[in-house]
Amino acid sequence: MTNDEREQSISGMWVKYLEGAAIALRCAIGSHEAMGGRVHGRRYDRRAVEALRGVLPYCLHPASSGDNAPFVWLNRDYKPLGVLPFNEFVTYSDFPWMHVCKEDPRIAFILSECKRCNAFCDGHPIFYLYDDATSPRRSKENATRLLGIIERVLATSGNHVPQCDIEGDKE
């Protein structure tokens, strides 16, 4: 398999991670639509939300330096989605399936509407989906808000998605 074929086969796999996060979050908040309408208790479960820490998206972070570098989906521990916090250091370029191009229409609203902290990575902003005050662990409303963001990303068409520069610019 060539590098181009490999990149094409993994491009956009982050969508599957977000789909899984949405299903799990629906269950944790007691959504009656979760699991085909069968949710036990149908109430918010903070412990369940806390258990999802490694799979829930927290921010879009530059994957590498350079103006054309893609973003990488990170969890609250600043690890790519699904990576548990006991991995002390990760290199974001080792997770190309979590990369999303800046021009991808599925994240356009995040880049324009979501909280942009004064945190920067090599001069490029980091886009946060929530902060400590709006953490999904704090309330059902906050968890529902995050679910809405995830669902909006998933509902936006991924047609005509630009090809990501997995390596970013080399300076």
Image: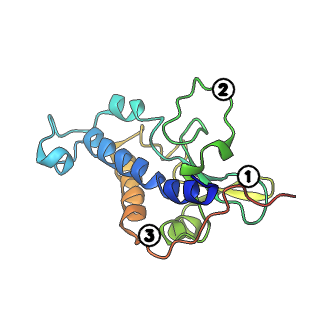
Q: Tell me the CA gap for discs 3 and 1.
A: 23 Å
Which of discs 2 and 3 lies nearer the camera? The answer is 3
Q: Which residue is mark 2?
A: 88
Crowding at dot 2, Cα within 10 Å, few <14 / some 14-19 / many 20+, comes out as few
> Mark 2 and 3 residues: CB-CB less than 8 Å, in contact?
no
Rendering coords of residue 124 (x, y %):
75, 59
Q: Residue at x 52, y 29 (%)?
A: 84
Q: Which residue is mark 1?
A: 64
Three-letter code for the amino acid on which mark 3 is drawn: Gly
Which badge, 2 or 1, is on the more N-terminal residue?
Answer: 1
In the image, 101 versus 136, the foreground residue is: 101
> Hey, which quadrant is residue 46 in on the image?
top left
Mark 1 falls on what kind of element? loop
> Mark 2 and 1 residues: CB-CB less than 8 Å, in contact?
no
Q: Tell me the CA gap for discs 2 and 1.
A: 18 Å
Q: Residue at x 42, y 38 (%)?
A: 138
